[in-house]
Image (cartoon, helix red, strand yellow):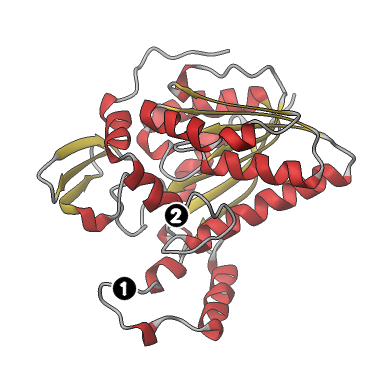
Amino acid sequence: MRHVSAVQDANVGLDYDRAGERYRAYADGDVEKLYEFDGQYAYGDQEIWRILGNTLNKLRARGRRELSVLDLGCGPGTWLRRTVDWAGKMGFTRITARGVDVAEAQVRRARLLSQDVASHAGVSLRFEAGDIRRGMLEPDCSVDICLCLYGVLNHLPANDLPTVFGEVARVTRGKLVATVRAIGSSPTIYVDGVKSAKAYHQDNAHGRLQVEFRNGARTSFPSHLFSAAEIRALATPALDIEDLSGLDLFHGRFATDPDWNPAEATPDANFIHALRTLERRFHRNPAFIDHATHLLLIARPKRS
């Protein structure tokens, strides 16, 4: 297990903790509707869930009944809860899952929301506060699915990512599914919707985001935007990349705003189909990939 001496910027966890339920609602929607994906980021969520569903299907098709899942930067636990719940429905009889996050209030929320799933027979589900750069508790080659979704890696200095990817490679026997904000993505303030900010500035020279909220609060925390070339270079020493693509090139940019657009502007099925066609056509195109909302990385550990 490798360790680093740096301590993650304290503001990251504090700001997610202050956002509390607002962050969960912004990021994940209705807690009672685990499998309904809607809102501005619905397309990205649907694609990630399709990948996870296919991964679970392949494991079960090989006769697997045991499953291990690790979620790095789990937030309020929605993705881990979703994966564990669905795995149980698919016939996995022994499921070990752990989520870790720097935001302690989000971890407590994850524990509360996951009580029902955690009580299922054969399920060991726990959430812990911690810095993902400080080494992972899981044994070598023990994790079937490692998740690291949305802004988690953007909050780390880029030169710390090889350490994280090295640990992921050590503990994982299956695959990593990770996303990062791209250099050409639309703006985010991570902890809440952009509308809650009075002003914001992404300082790309120093990798920090400054935000002034409408309630008068101010904050600054690490925010490094990645190009596809950079994330590939950082991951490649430890991981074999199965796929690196743009996640949501068009859907988020064409999403309507209920505070601005009338109901009749809502895209119909034909329009949504056309957007999906465009996504499939351009999501690996070098001229487009860095303009996606996120970069989607799917990788497996290198084995000597």
Q: Nearer the viewer, residue 197 or 176?
A: 197
Q: Position of residue 139 (x, y in %)?
A: 68, 17
Q: Position of residue 222 (x, y in %)?
A: 29, 35
Identified by mark 2, the residue type is: Gly
Disc 1 residue crowd, few under 14, some 14–19, many 20+, Cα 10 Å: few
Say which element carries label 2.
loop
Q: Nearer the viewer, residue 237 or 68?
A: 68
Question: What residue is disc 2 on?
Answer: 29
Q: CA distance from mark 2 to mark 1?
A: 16 Å
Q: Position of residue 288 (x, y in %)?
A: 46, 64
In the image as oriented, which residue stretches furthest toward the right? 63
Eyeballing the image, is 260 above or below 24? below
Q: Quadrant of the C terminus?
A: top right
**Residue that appears at 28% across and 48% down:** 189
Identified by mark 1, the residue type is: Pro
- The answer to which image quadrant residue 152 occupies is top left
Q: Nearer the viewer, residue 115 or 44?
A: 115
Would you say residue 286 is visible in this rendering?
no
Q: Quadrant of the N terminus?
A: top right
**Residue that appears at 62% across and 53% down:** 49
**Residue that appears at 31% across and 73% down:** 258
| For marks 2 and 1 on the same chain, the one whose residue lies earlier in the sequence | 2
Residue 282 circle label: none
